[in-house]
Image (tube, rainbow, N blue to C red):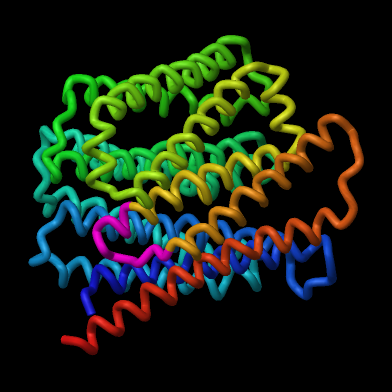
Amino acid sequence: MNNIKLHSKVALLYLFIAAFLGIILRFFPVTNIDATYRYVVHTHSHIALLGWVYIALATLIFHIGIDNKKQKKHNLIFWCTQITIIGMLFSFPFIGYAFYSIIFSTLFLICSYWFYAFFRKNHNLRTSATSYKFISTSLLLMVISTIGPWALGIIMNTLGATSPWYKNAIYFYLHFQYNGWFIFCLMGVFYFLLEKSKIPFSKKVANQFFKLMLVCCVLTLFLSFLWTKPSTIIYIIAFSGGILQLIAIRIFHKQIQEIKIKLKELLKPQLYKLLQLVFILFLLKISLQAFTGIPYFSELATNILDFVIGYLHLTFLGIVTIATFVFLKFFKLIQLPKVWTQVYILGFILSEVLIFYKGFSAWQQTYLIDNYFILLVICSALMPIGILGILLKTNFTASTQQESL
C-alpha cells in the first residue's frame, strides 16, 4: 500500500477515536461513567489535535511539497510521532497530566520540530508561490504555538495553576493552532490546487490576503486574553483584528468569485459544495471572533463555557475537518462516500445547534428542553458513525485496489 495513503488512514482512525471519546464525554451527564471526566477531556483534545489534524495536514504537506524519494526519512518521523500519540492515548485517560503523559507530549513537540526542519530542508515548492508562503508560515506558527506548552511548566513551578498566566499559556497555544497552523496550512493546500491546475489568479491580491491574515493572526491573539478584563487598548487591538479578518475574507471571496467556474470544474460538485460549506462556517467563525472583541460579548463568552465549546467545535469539526476531507479526497488519499459524509455533517450541525442552544439558554436564563443531554448524545453519535463509514470505505477500496494489482 502507498505509505501516504496508510498515513491518511491512520489520521482518520485518530479522528474516529477522538469522536468516540467525545461521545463518552457526552454520556457523563446522562449516566455514571467509571472514568475521570477531566482525564477523558485531555485525551479527547490531544488525539483530535495531534492525532487527526496534525497527521492529516503533515501528510498533505508531504504529498504536495516533498519528493517521494524522501519517503524513508518521512516514515521514520511519522512512526516516531505515532509512538508519542499512542503514548498519550494510553496515559491521559488514566493519569491526566502526569509524568508519563507529559513525557509523551514533550516528545511529540520534538517530533513536530523534526518535521518542520525536514520540510524546510526537503520541500520542492517554489518559494515565490502563494502556496509555499501559507504552508511555510503555517508550520512556523505551529512551532510558535508550542511556546504555550513549554511555558506551562515554568508557570506551574513559579506562579501555580491558579495564575492567569496559566490559562493564557493554554489559550496562546490553542490560538496559534486553530487560527495559525490549521487555517494557514489549509489555505496553502487550496492555493496549491489552483497553482497545480494552472487556474489563473491574481498573485498580488493573494499576497495582500496572506499579509492581512498574518496580521490578523497576531492581533486576534488578544481576543484570547480578554477574560482577564485588560486595559482598553487591548480591547481595541483585539477588536481591530476581528474587523481586519472580515476585510481579509472579503478580499479572498472576491478572488474566488473570479475563478468560480474553473474551480467548480476542478473540484466537481461534491467537493465544491463542501468547500462552500467550509467558507460559510469560516465566515461565521470570524464574525463570532469580531463580536468577542466587544466587552459585553467577551464577558459572555468567558462566563458561558458552551459558547467557547461551540466555537472550538465549529472551527475543528466544521472548518478544519471538512476542508481536510476535501483535500485528502482530491488527492485520492481517502474515499469520501456521499452518504457517510452527509451523516457526519448532519451530526456536526445538529450538535452545534444544541451546544449553542444550551449557551443561549444559560444567557437568557431559560429552561432546557426535556432530555437535552440524551438528544445531544444521539446527534453527536452521528459523527463517529459517519467517520467510521468513511474509514471503512477508504480501507475497503485500498484493499480492493491492492488485490487487483
Where 329 sits versus 221, above or below? below
Quarter holding the N terminus?
bottom left
Foreground pick, 368 / 389: 389
Question: In the image, which residues are magenta?
Answer: 327-337
Quarter holding the C terminus?
bottom left
Foreground pick, 218 / 385: 385
Instruction: Reply yes or no: does residue 329 show up in magenta.
Output: yes
Taking 156 as reference, is 391 left or right? left
Query: Where residue 373 sits: x, y (%)?
Result: 80, 57
Instruction: Reply yes or no: does residue 105 show up in magenta.
Output: no
Determine the residue positioned at 33% across, 54% down: 57
Where 8 sits versus 226, above or below? below
Determine the residue positioned at 32% across, 71% down: 80
Taking 93 as reference, is 114 left or right? left
- Choose top left, top right, bottom left or bottom right for residue 404: bottom left
Question: Is any atom of residue 392 visible in this view?
Answer: yes
Foreground pick, 251 / 177: 251
- Choose top left, top right, bottom left or bottom right for residue 6: bottom left
Question: Is any atom of residue 147 visible in this view?
Answer: no
- Choose top left, top right, bottom left or bottom right for residue 135: top left
Taking 14 as reference, is 110 left or right? left
Determine the residue positioned at 46% across, 73% down: 86
User: What predominant SS class does the magenta segment belong to?
Assistant: loop
Determine the residue positioned at 38% across, 71% down: 10
Query: Where residue 156 sits: x, y (%)?
Result: 61, 47
Query: Where residue 102 sits: x, y (%)?
Result: 52, 62
Q: How many marks?
A: 0
Query: Where residue 214 sits: x, y (%)?
Result: 34, 27
Foreground pick, 32 / 145: 32
